[in-house]
Image (cartoon, coloured by chain):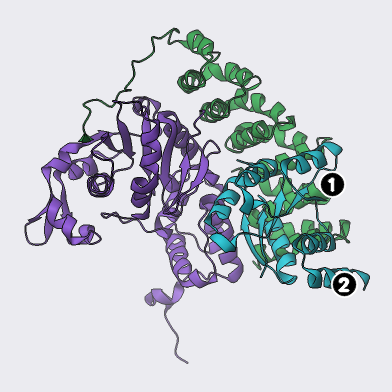
Amino acid sequence: MGLKKHADASALHPVATRDYARDLPGLVAQMGDVEAAVRRWAVRDLGAYPAAVTALGARLAVETDSSVRSALFSTLSRLGGDDAVTAMLPLLRSEDPELRNGAIEVLSGLPEAVAPHIEALLCDRDSDVRIFTVNLLGDLRHLCVVAWLERVLMQDAAVNVVGAALEVLAEVGTAGSLTALRAVARRFPDDAFIAFAVDLAVERIGTP
Amino acid sequence: MYRILVVDDAATVRMYHRKLLSDAGWHTDEALNGVEALERVHAQEGDEAFDLYVVDVNMPRMDGYSFVRELRRLGPRHQAPVVMVSTEAQRQDVDAALDAGANTYLVKPAQPLDLVLSAALLLGDRDAALVAAQGART
Amino acid sequence: MKTINLAAQPSLLVVPPVITDADFRKFAEFFYRKTGIHFDESKRYFVDKRLVERIENTGADTFRAWFVALRFETDGAELQQLVNIMTVNETYFFREAYQFDCMVNNMLDEVAVRKRPGSRIRIWSIPSSTGEEPYSIAIYLLERWAKIDQYDVEILSSDIDTSVLKAAQRGIYSQRSVGNLPPQYLKKYFKPHGDNEWRISRDLVDSVEFSRVNLSEPTDTRRFRDIDVIFCRNLLIYFDDLSRRVAAEAMFDSMSPGGFICLGHSESMSRMSSLYTVRRFPDAMVYQKPLEA
């Protein structure tokens, strides 16, 4: 007993015989395995195949295990591209917070691919979708972020969408944002939180 | 001195709620999602447990409902009242909050009076409740 | 009137950037959101000095210009530099020893209860850097775990940097590095080396398995299985958001159900992954892979 060395850091139980081919179709099939760990490895290995994005997105629609979902989102983030964005957009409407938040995280890491969709999302009829879009702008590295947020301040009718935008603008707002901030204060004159958030954003933007 | 944990992924909202609550005379701490909130809870020693939680629903990593369910599962010392705060106002949202173990529910953006009065009443802090209620009448 | 030739007085042209209260709060909120580390007013001097250093190093004129670049940079390089400069990065024996206490007082006992007879307990130190951490674990196991004679324990020790792995295998340490060790352990496991250094016993070096591993590379991590305790301290805080997730997921995969992971004292899974459960023990707060996973 005591400290022991093992010559190779391999699993201590026999490695399961492989049922699946290690190519794209084989890995996609493996994504349907009954064992979550096996599905996770398939998802991770599919990170080597850009063409797998559609299959990964389709798996998300039916996968219920959190650890596999997590691997799906990470792999889609790594693959990136327009197809990954296309797979994520419908999830912004999901009732499942794990799927919504996973999609927001993936999208916020794909600035060039998601940018063409932002304006339409910010005009969505569903105020929740608009809030989630503002949330993703919070981490998005794109130079239009400030302009998009200012438009929300000028035009969005929903107080919680505006509140979310004020949150992000406190960090990224510029002197040019002050006009939009004054407009918000006028549009929601009786809301204590909006007043607080506007003052905070003005303070954080500082005097240039 | 009553201790309140404010849980919300938006820094501005945390700041706003904390200001309202500390102006009412209570100590506050914060977390930005359910995981961090559980860490704050676990970090409390014995009699320093939180007396009240103000918890946002929509947060990444672990949402408000999950946090409250986990909190209640921690045992007898973790049954302090929870004010759930949400942008939603549907029946299913109220149901979800109460089923998870929350005590009351506010719709965002929370009005100062609603937040402070709810907190005061749940804490059993009659002085603070009176101040809040009287402040509303002026 | 005396005229000043500014060209001959370059120091007059350079005004160090000013960090206003609003700047400080903006930085503090951003940093807290990204890392979980909270700086309040009492840390003003510490923070301002380092912000000025980053601003000047990047050639920005003002805090604002530097912050915009930080917020919108695509490669995360400046954020990594910033985290580096705002955190203390030393390694030494028995650093954050409360986690080793937790290991021998609680975690290993829970792990042992679940072990099939004859199977080993596996502990993974990553990054192991120059070896202080895995050797600290070894000493703790030999000296402070009551059940060490009843179980076989493997210590796996990995780092992305082969030069530190080599240093770990050489096993020579400075006075500073061993300063936290109880004198009886220093005497028992080290011999003086040269004027002011110490060489760790070959037995300990031989009891640890070293390997080069990049946590972001699935091909590196897939061969680690059935790990019962992971020490991953003060590494993930330097990663970008995606790399952190990927690393947290890779470690999750490597662990036995019910396995434990310890992060650095200012790190938190709340910014990385929701797969783990928070566990509070008397000595430390750690994370656990669910038993049903």
Q: Colour of chain C?
A: purple
Q: Colour of chain A?
A: green
Residue at 72%, 41% in the rendered image: B100
- Which chain is disc 1 placed on? A
Task: Report the disc number at residue A158.
Answer: 1
> Mark 2 belongs to which amino acid?
Gly
Give the chain ID for the cyan colour: B
* Disc 1 and disc 2 in contact, CB within 8 angstroms: no
> Mark 1 belongs to which amino acid?
Ala
Task: Report the disc number at residue C228.
Answer: none
Disc 1 from disc 2: Cα separation: 28 Å
Q: Classify residue C53 by image quadrant.
A: bottom left
Whether residue A122 is visible: no
Q: Position of residue A110 (x, y in %)?
A: 58, 34
Residue at 64%, 59% in the rendered image: B50
Q: Which residue is mark 2?
A: B135
Q: Position of residue A85 (x, y in %)?
A: 64, 28
C109 or B84, nearer to the observer? C109
**Crowdedness near tag 2: few (<14), some (14–19) or many (≥20) residues, C-alpha within 10 Å:** few
Q: Secondary structure at mark 1?
A: loop
Q: Is residue C24 left or right of residue B7?
A: left
Q: Nearer the viewer, mark 1 or mark 2?
A: 2
